[in-house]
Every structure is written in C-alpha cells, then in structure tokens.
Image (tube, rainbow, N blue to C red):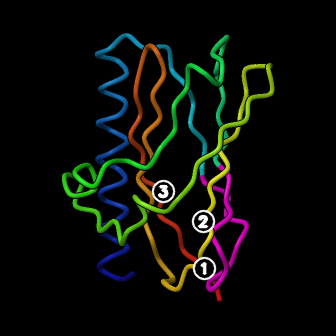
Amino acid sequence: MGKKIQETIAASGRILAATLLMCVAMGAEALEVGHLELKSRLGDPLKASIALDQLGTLTSEQIKVRSAAAEDYALMGIDSMGMDTFVRYELFLDGNGKGMILVTTERPLSEPFVSLLVEIVWPNGKVLREFPVLLDP
C-alpha cells in the first residue's frame, strides 16, 4: 500500500475518533454519516453520494453541509488539492429520518486520488469527516 494511502487511512481514523469524542462531549444526538458512494470515473466530473441516517426530526434548514475550510484540511494534514473550493454539496431528506448528500463538481477530475473533508453542522452537533476518493480510469 502506498505511503499516501496509509497516511490517509491513519488520518481517517484520527478524524473518526475526534468526531466520536466531540459528539459524546457535546451530548449530541448522533446523526449517522455513511460512506461515500462514487458514481464517476477519472476524467469525469465528480458525482457521488453520502447516506445520512438517524436524522430524527431535523429539517434541511437545520443541517448545513459544506467543504471544510482550508485551515481544517491543513490541521488534519490533508492536501485539499483545491477540493475545498469547487465541490458542491446538495442535501436531500426523505422525511423518514434518512437523507443523502449529493457531491458533485462541474469540472472533470484529473487526479486518481483525492480527499474530501466534509463539514456537517446541525443544531446539536458538528461532524468533520474525511472521504478518500479513488477514481478508476
């Protein structure tokens, strides 16, 4: 396994641990964030989705999804490769406690490996989560 991938996996573990501690410390109800499901290939614009669960009665107005700030990427030791400025996140809720975040870009991705650092904020909590993306040709 390449060094960059090993570093990314290690960083993901640190983010998960920090997120869990933050949620416990805040007494937040756990909003469950699923894995990223990739729907595009190398050389195409990014199209992916992230499942959300355990939303309870939260509304789309209460949940904010965005790329983490460049400072957060730096603090986590992740190269943003500009992903913090041109990735779009669109939230969809089904009204039954589940939802989905649609992750897209307008321009094609030319790098086979990128990391997205996503910030999800709701009234009782905040999650900062890294999603490593490996694009097949």
Where is residue 109 shown, x and y percent of the image?
A: 55, 79
Mark 1 vs 3, N-terminal side: 1
Q: Residue at x 48, y 83 (%)?
A: 111
Instruction: Using the image, determine if residue 41 lies above or below residue 61.
Output: below
In this figure, which residue is indicated by the disc labeled 3?
131
Residue at the disc numbered 2: 105
Q: 40 or 27, which is in the foreground?
A: 40
Q: Which quadrant, please, contains the N terminus?
A: bottom left
* Picture layout, residue 132 above or below residue 120: below
| Cβ atoms at labels 1 and 2 below 8 Å apart | yes
Is residue 102 shown in magenta?
no
- Looking at the rendered image, the quarter that the C terminus falls into is bottom right
Residue, far left: 75
* Tag 1 residue: 108
Asked if residue 30 lies left or right of residue 60, the reply is left
> Would residue 115 appear left or right of 24 to someone viewing this image?
right
Q: List x then y, in percent, for residue 113.
A: 47, 77
In the foreground, 6 or 122: 122
Q: How many residues crowd around disc 3 within 10 Å: few (fewer than 14), some, or many (20 or more)?
A: some
Q: Residue type at mark 3: give it.
A: Phe
The type of residue carrying mark 1 is: Pro
